[in-house]
Amino acid sequence: MLWLCQENLRKSLSWRVSAFACALLWLASARATAQPGPFVPVASDLLLQGRPAEGLLILRSGYQNSPLIDADTLVFVGANERNPYGDVLTVSVGVREPHGWGSARLGRFLLSTGAVRPVHMDGVTLHARTPFDTHLELFGGAPVVRELGARAFDWLAGGRLSQRVLEERVGVGVSYLQRRDAGELAQHEVGADLSLRPVHWLAVSALASWDMLSAGLAEGRINAVAYASRGQVELHASRRVASRLLPATSLFSVISRAPSSELGASARYRLFPRLALIPFGALEGLDSHWGYRATLRTVLNLTAAEGGRLSLEASRRKLAREGYSAGLVQLELPSVASVVAHASFELVASDHPDGRGAVWPWARVGASYPLASAWLLSGALGWRASPEYKSDLYALVRLSLRTQLLSLGASQAGLP
């Protein structure tokens, strides 16, 4: 592991930035005492697949439990023969006013605010709240480029203004986003969002975003959830126009730019203390084609406590000419000698196989075992058949570490 970090620190700018952020976290704790206080947790996940020179390493760390400051970093390495180096997904430091009147975050982070689309940016966001529960959020910076690459006149900016009234039963907000690539206008979007809680058992939320470049709706969604003592019912409707949501340079815009719609309902009803019934149904539209999706799932908890369950699911989907039916069985056994075992089996039957096989099976068995208080070892063995593969056997091994790197003492001179 040390060799991997040294090589990437030498060859990748993003790894240097991550190391610099971790160094700042360490320096921030240099004046700590042995008293309990804010801490710096470190977590890592290593996932190996059954092909040579392929794997996934995720490193996470953060500075938490402080009323004034927090920091986090997430480093991702997807290794193969063509790309042995990693990249930093997030590395940021946040400060906040202890009474909740304002906060700020600086660095690389993923920002999702209001009705406009989420943005992955290198920059800063500022948030302020008034005594009247009015919130103002402003952000600006540059769109993320791999390994902090150079950008020519690329920037984005926007904000959100929101207000909550009637003891937070009603909330409204308006959002704005502008993005430029090489100085040219690439995204120009406004949006509005609404949340309602008229009674304790009903919650309603809605949002809509408008693309100002093409003068059309980019996305609209509405959800209503009704709660009861033994379950809940949800109604939802959505409309998304991919050509207005995806940048013109996105690979997905080449695959499909068609608008999609969905109108559906789902529920969760507890028949017995350990048995739940979960139905789902929806009408789906893609461009000028219409279809439906229906699922019925049951979940049986094997014990009164968490840790063991049996799930049965049957589903049917039809859209234009394509359609399939599927059945799924999932089993998770309660922990025995600290070992948690799980298994699943699925069958998918296509309406029009076209010589790709009438039924596609998929099966997987696995288990997890805590090696120590901070280490978790997981493994799985799977087999599948699909339209692309007549037979594919694969194995997954995951080794996870979560520990507390530094224990920070009580603040000195009012500083965290």
Image (tube, rainbow, N blue to C red):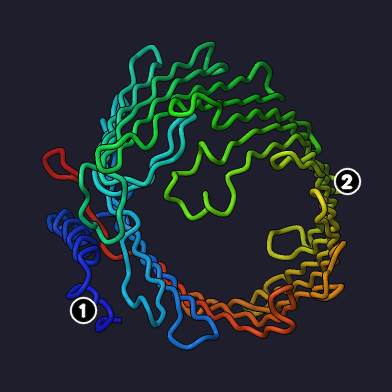
Q: Secondary structure at mark 2?
A: strand
Residue 98 in sight here: no
Q: Is residue 176 visible?
A: yes
At a point 71% along the width and 30% down the height, the residue shown is 225
Q: Nearer the viewer, residue 257 or 172?
A: 257
Q: Is residue 395 depicted above or below 32 in this figure?
A: below
Q: Nearer the viewer, residue 42 or 312?
A: 312
Q: Is residue 399 above or below residue 159?
A: below
Q: Is residue 353 left or right of residue 62?
A: right
Residue at the spot of label 2: 271
Q: Amino acid at mark 1?
A: Gln
Tell me if 128 is positioned left or right of 368 in this view.
left
- Quarter of the image holding residue 312? bottom right
- Residue 49: x %, y % from top left: 53, 81
Q: Which residue carries the number 1 mark?
A: 6
- Does residue 340 appear left or right of residue 345 in this picture? left
- Which is nearer the eye, 390 or 72? 390
Name the secondary structure under disc 1. helix
Outermost residue toward the bottom in this view: 52
All told, the count of numbered labels is 2
* Nearer to the camera, 215 or 128: 215
Residue 33: % across, % down:
18, 57
Expressed as whole percent of the image width and height from the top left, the position of residue 388 reads 69, 75
Percent coordinates x, y for residue 390 in the rendering: 74, 82
What whole-number distance in Å separates the C-alpha atoms at marks 1 and 2? 56 Å
Which quadrant of the structure image shows residue 310? bottom right
Q: Earlier in the sequence, mark 1 or mark 2?
A: 1
Q: Residues within 10 Å of mark 2 (few under 14, many from 20)?
A: few
Circle nearer the viewer, 1 or 2: 1
- Amino acid at dot 2: Leu
